[in-house]
Amino acid sequence: MLPTLTHTHHGHSGLCAALNGSPLRIALLYTESNLTPWKENVNEETLLYLASNAPQDVIPTIIHFEGFEQKLASQLRSFDVVFNLCYGYHEASQVEVAEWLTRHGITHTASAPAAMRKAQDKALLPAFCRELGLHTPEILKCPEKLNDEALYLRKPRLGSCHRNIDIETGAWFKARYTLREPDFLVQPYIQGREFSVGVISNQEGTDFECLPPVEIFPEDGNVIYTAGKAFGKTNRCFSPELPGCVEAELYRAARLLHKHLGLSGMSRTDFRCDTNGKVYVLDVNALPNLDPVRSLMPAICEHAGISITELMRRTLAQTLQQQAMSLTSAVP
């Protein structure tokens, strides 16, 4: 467990104006990777990276989440904003942590719990995509629908971090699964190119903007792959060659889903583009990880000319904007 660390920057970032000129006191709230449900990338390097790159006029303090305790809630309420890097605690998910923070009146940078819950549940994605005119792989529930020779993907309904995923033929699945497991989904495997698009707050914290897509591709050229290393090593291309219509659809879909789900702060949506150029939504990540080496979001921002300092500033500005609007609407 990391010791609490406080690091102060001097200067003017605009954030302190919301507090009548006082520095913004933020808590970098985290849970160690081995204590999160899907072992997300949260480590000392990430926390020190964020603390040392915090915006000017921000005083960051690293706080370790040690359970749903009243004492911790009281401590967190003493900060102006909690920069939420807590991806769960033991069996509790990141949504349950956000719910606990919200219930205790703690201002934090993650999306509203209801929005996070909708994004986390992949079984809900087909309905959202239909409403928005987007495509996503069909969720298959009847074994007889599987073609013995075709490829299918089985993945957890909630979370994953690229874990517990199977990509096999229909015959393989028929021999092993009933397709009626509530915690897993089976879908056709989309062969093609994979992309990820980040959505972040604009400079003023009043709206959102999409960042250029990054392509994730298999190092060995295999048609069966996922981001990560479960099916072989993958690499990233931050300047992929894309038809204009495909790039526009990636932007449109990421922004539509971010707003439709009611997400705030930042999100990252994963896509597959099949060999005919049809774009499929795979997943919406409502709380992207910020590991400076292994995570996609910081790298996507960097290649778009947005530093981690600016990403934090925009996220904090948008959180303060939302807090101000909430207080204004609560006044009779």
Image (tube, rainbow, N blue to C red):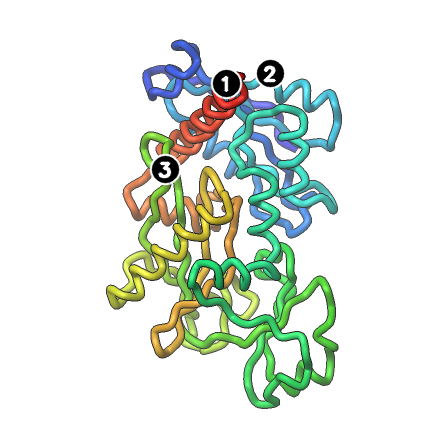
Of labels 2 and 3, earlier in sequence is 2
| Secondary element at tag 2 | loop
Nearer to us of marks 1 and 3 is: 3
Residue 301 in the image, given as x and y percentages of width and height: 35, 44
Crowding around mark 2 (Cα neighbors within 10 Å: few <14, some 14 to 19, many 20+) is few
- Residue tagged 3: 207
At label 1, which amino acid type do we have? Answer: Arg
Crowding around mark 3 (Cα neighbors within 10 Å: few <14, some 14 to 19, many 20+) is few
Query: Which residue is located at x 46 percent, y 22 percent?
Result: 324
Residue 257 in the image, given as x and y percentages of width and height: 45, 52
Foreground of the two, 291 or 174: 174
Nearer to us of marks 2 and 3 is: 3
**Hey, which quadrant is residue 209 in on the image?**
top left
- What is the count of numbered marks? 3
| Secondary element at tag 3 | loop
- Residue tagged 1: 25
- Residue tagged 2: 78
Crowding around mark 1 (Cα neighbors within 10 Å: few <14, some 14 to 19, many 20+) is some
| Distance between the alpha carbons at the discs numbered 1 and 3 | 24 Å
